[in-house]
Amino acid sequence: MKCPFCQHEDTQVLDTRVSEEGDAIRRRRRCVQCDKRFTTYERIELSMPIIVKKNGSRTEFASSKLRGSLMLALRKRPVPAAAIDAAVASIEEKLLTSGRREVDTGYVGELVMQELKRLDEIAYIRFASVYKDFKDLAEFQQALAEVGHSRK
């Protein structure tokens, strides 16, 4: 590892420990050139997958868009902001831990529908009607029947 003081390429590891939280490795290092000491931390880096749209274009994940979709479906519904925050966090965690570099919008839509179904059935139907592009009343009735069956 490069020394942050003299930029020399060679350093020695003097001590290695796992952090108290267990999510990082702390290494104490010494530069063989300038003899200065410094600490480095090694952590797992999780990054959000790229979102692949229906037209094939790719875009970065935007938490604000996710929150906006949930808020639109939940408009005028008695769902606390903390529950919406928890739903956003849950979806983001599933995306982060999916291990996938790219996910299509359909996968994200399904995650949103799972959260909405848990939070508010009316919001779920609102979102599903747009997301699944219901063509007629029969498709609405089928979605309503699914919600009714999941309650029992």
Image (tube, helix red, strand yellow):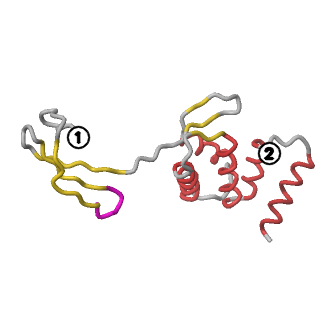
Is residue 23 a member of the stretch shown in magenta?
yes
Q: Secondary structure at mark 2?
A: helix
Mark 2 crowdedness (10 Å alpha carbons): few <14, some 14-19, many ≥20: some
Position of residue 134 in the picture relative to residue 107 (left or right): right
Is residue 40 a member of the stretch shown in magenta?
no
Q: Magenta stretch: give its range.
A: 19-24
The tag earlier along the polypeptide, 2 or 1, is 1
Residue at screen point 9% across, 43% down: 36
Question: Image quadrant for the N terminus?
Answer: top left
Q: Which residue is mark 2?
A: 129
Q: Secondary structure at mark 1?
A: loop
* Nearer to me, 64 or 18: 18
Mark 1 crowdedness (10 Å alpha carbons): few <14, some 14-19, many ≥20: few
Q: Position of residue 117 (x, y in %)?
A: 71, 58
* Nearer to me, 74 or 32: 32
Which residue type does callout 2 highlight?
Ser
Residue at screen point 51% across, 43% down: 48
Compared to 81, does 53 lie above or below? above
What type of secondary structure mainly makes up the magenta span?
loop
Q: CA distance from mark 2 to mark 1?
A: 54 Å
Residue at screen point 27% across, 50% down: 41
Which residue type does callout 1 highlight?
Met
Question: Image quadrant for the C terminus?
Answer: bottom right
* Nearer to me, 68 or 77: 68
Residue at screen point 68% across, 61% down: 118
**Marker count (numbered):** 2
Compared to 26, does 32 lie above or below? above
Return the mark for residue 1.
1
Return the mark for residue 78.
none
Circle 2 or circle 1, nearest the eye: 1
* Nearer to me, 8 or 96: 8
Corner quadrant of residue 49 = top right
